[in-house]
Image (cartoon, grey):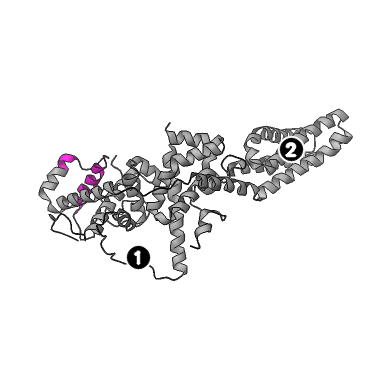
Amino acid sequence: MDDLTRAAVAAQRGGPAELAALVRAGYPQVWTLCAHLVDPESADDLAQESYLRICRALPGFRRDAPARTWMLAIARRTCMDELRTRVRRRGREQLAAAPPERPAPVADDPPFAVRSLLARLEPERRAAFALTQLLGLGYDDAAAVLGCPPGTVRSRVARARTELIRHAGGAPEEGHESDAR
Amino acid sequence: MRDDDGPPAGPPDAGGPEVPLDPPDGPPQRCRDVRLSLSAAADGEDAPVGPVERGEHLGTCAACRDWAARAERVDRRVRVAPALPVRDRTDEVVAAVLADGRRRDRRPSPVRAGLALAAAAHLVVVVPALVVADAGPDVPPHAARELGVFNLALGVAFAVAAYRPSRAPGLRLPTGVAAVALCLLAVVDAALGRTTVAVELPHLASLAGWVLLCVLVRRGGGDGPGPGRVDVAAAVPAGRPPPGPTARDDRDAA
């Protein structure tokens, strides 16, 4: 049993100290996922909301499952709900705030725009890419978080790569490619 | 594992409109398979197209060579990008979780109201049986008192569960044994003519109380120092977060 799962099991029966240990152990990953799936400005709120849901669901947590994928799955659902709400709100407010069809290529600045690159990915791909590339999950674990087969993770990650290549393609690169889309 | 990413004649992915790896006028199928495999291999995962075949294809396909080089660069950029800074908000999050648990435990619910009602029904039976030692013409006084104690225990159990849902899980088994056995015996004895349905009807209150208690347990109950134990179901399927003070409310205006 890994540390995070042990912390989750302890928090099931424990008090505030065990709960704090679970937060400390899992928060960075939950926050990072939220930051990439929605945006870093909202990540504090979303990570906290994820933890509320995690703790409400904690009595039903089965210790034979790794807590990491379980918690990240809840965090992901929290983010998806938030994105859905935003889409609805935007629709209601009749803001023609649809993202531009062809976003400008991302600048190659040092703080780099990995984040703004990722932000252009379609949510399912962004989730697959963030889980596997930024949080270091294997395809199997990412599949457990996303609730899809590992093969779907594989194709989403590949598509995300292709999309990223396309978005980053505008910046001048090392130059040995001919076809800059 | 080579599951569902075979020929993308149809959308290979569950859910969501997936655009093909490249535009319709993009690379042929073989190129897509090779890129999918290059991507998987870069992550150390199973790839449908093996390394030798990939090498052969790359030797003949400039577009895929280009893709591979660019993908490598994208990966490098992602790898070297500094991680986003995570603030330690343990205390805030713990406080929010505890407040959430308390709020949910205070929230009235029809289930808890029903449990309180079941408790009241049992206590109504208790008073005459226990105090006056009278549980009907055919019941000896001491048996009436014992019956009273039995109902007192059930009533208290339901009342405790209604008042403190977090204690419901421990009460499920003993009240279940009592309620189910009572009803079974009532049916058997009614069939044998040892009692009448009308006399045994009150046992339905025990059964109802137990069912409500089970509902409460399923939804989780919660209070006290531990994390809130409410609404397992609500947290798992995608549902809107319940209204209530979260960090968002404090800063939404900003």
**Would you call the spot at circle 1 few (<14 residues within 10 Å), some (14-19), or many (20 or more)?**
few
Give SS at disc 2: helix
Q: Indicate which disc residue B156 carries.
A: 2
The image shows residue B251 at horizontal and vertical percentages of 50, 59
* Spatial separation of the CA atoms under disc 1 and disc 2: 60 Å
Q: Nearer the viewer, residue A122 or B72?
A: B72
A126 with respect to B195 (left or right): left
Residue visible at 46% across and 55% down in the picture: A81
Highlighted range, magenta: B27-53
User: Which quarter shows the N terminus of chain B?
Assistant: top left
Residue visible at 89% across and 35% down in the picture: B132
* Chain letter belonging to callout 2: B
Badge 1 amino acid: Pro
**Does any portion of residue A64 appear in the rendered image?**
no
* Chain letter belonging to callout 1: A
How many tags in the picture? 2
